[in-house]
Amino acid sequence: MRIDVLTVFPGMLDGFIRESMLKRAADLGRVALHTVDLRDYTVDAHRTTDDRPYGGGPGMVMKVEPIISAVEDIRTENARVILMSPQGQVFRQSVARALAVESHLIFICGHYEGIDERVRLLLQAEELSIVDYVLTNGVLPAAVVVDAVVRLLPGVLGGEGATEEESFSDGLLEYPQYTRPVEYRGLRVPDVLRSGNHAAVRAWRREQAEARTRERRKDLLQ
């Protein structure tokens, strides 16, 4: 998979793509992750990527030309262009799984007050939002989506089935997890998890997942 992240602050992603799971995915050849500095696609001496909004109002709006030029330069035939925006579809695990089978993803990160609407219209870009709040720019939301997608690629987490039993994989929150020691400060690992009875363990985990979801995220049960 190839992933391109378009931003005016590429340095925000440097550490993110060189550590932990994303580095492993790159080393395995599962993903080629690139940051694209939108300033490289400007045509003026000041490398301007934003301007005042028509109609007045606070803040600045990202210009259409650098973004369109950047996307047209790197876009492959099957690329999906995604605009990170608080107005977009809410990003969920099901969306991550759908994106994980793509060959090329292009993320456009907004900054300042917003992005010229012609970017969305000309590129027919999809819009994604991670939650119902506004951040300074779209880099962090893009990083969240990239992380959620790349970890689903085969072999990245180091074991088959590693992503199958976790929160949201089957519409439920994940069951409680335990490891050594058996007892710590009066709290013991449930006996069923040490019983060796795999059917009983599966039943306990399902029961716990359903109970936790009812308690914390009833909306998922709808």
Image (cartoon, rainbow, N blue to C red):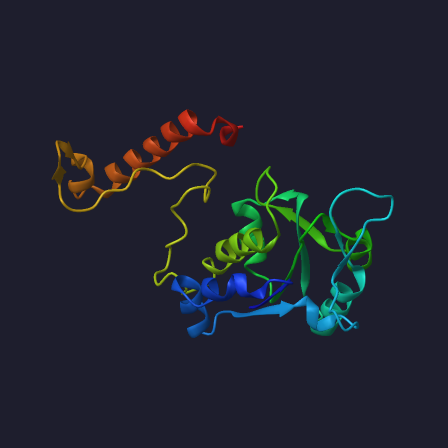
Q: Is residue 28 left or right of residue 197?
A: right
Q: Which residue extends farthest right? A: 55
Q: Position of residue 156 (x, y in %)?
A: 41, 64
Residue 78 in view in this figure: no
Query: The N terminus appears in which quarter of the rendering?
Result: bottom right
**In the rendered picture of this protein, how many numbered marks are placed on residues?**
0
Residue at image location 70% in from the left, 52% down from the top = 126
Find residue 72 and report its horizontal and vertical position in percent.
75, 70
Residue 45 against residue 172 in the figure, above or below: below
Report whether 66 appears left or right of 153.
right
Q: Residue furthest front?
A: 46
- Which of the pair 55/217 is nearer the observer? 55
Which image quarter is the C terminus in? top right
Q: Is residue 119 left or right of residue 13?
A: right
- At which x and y percent is residue 17? 47, 65
Q: In the picture shown, does residue 123 fall above or below 205?
A: below
Query: In the image, what residue occupies the spot 64% across and 63% down?
Result: 8
* Front one among 39 and 127: 39
Which residue occupies the foreground of this view, 9 or 74? 9
Regarding residue 198, the answer to whether it shows in the image is yes
Q: Residue at x 38, y 46 (%)?
A: 165
> Residue 207 appears at what percent x and percent y?
33, 31
Which residue is located at x 76 percent, y 70 percent?
A: 42
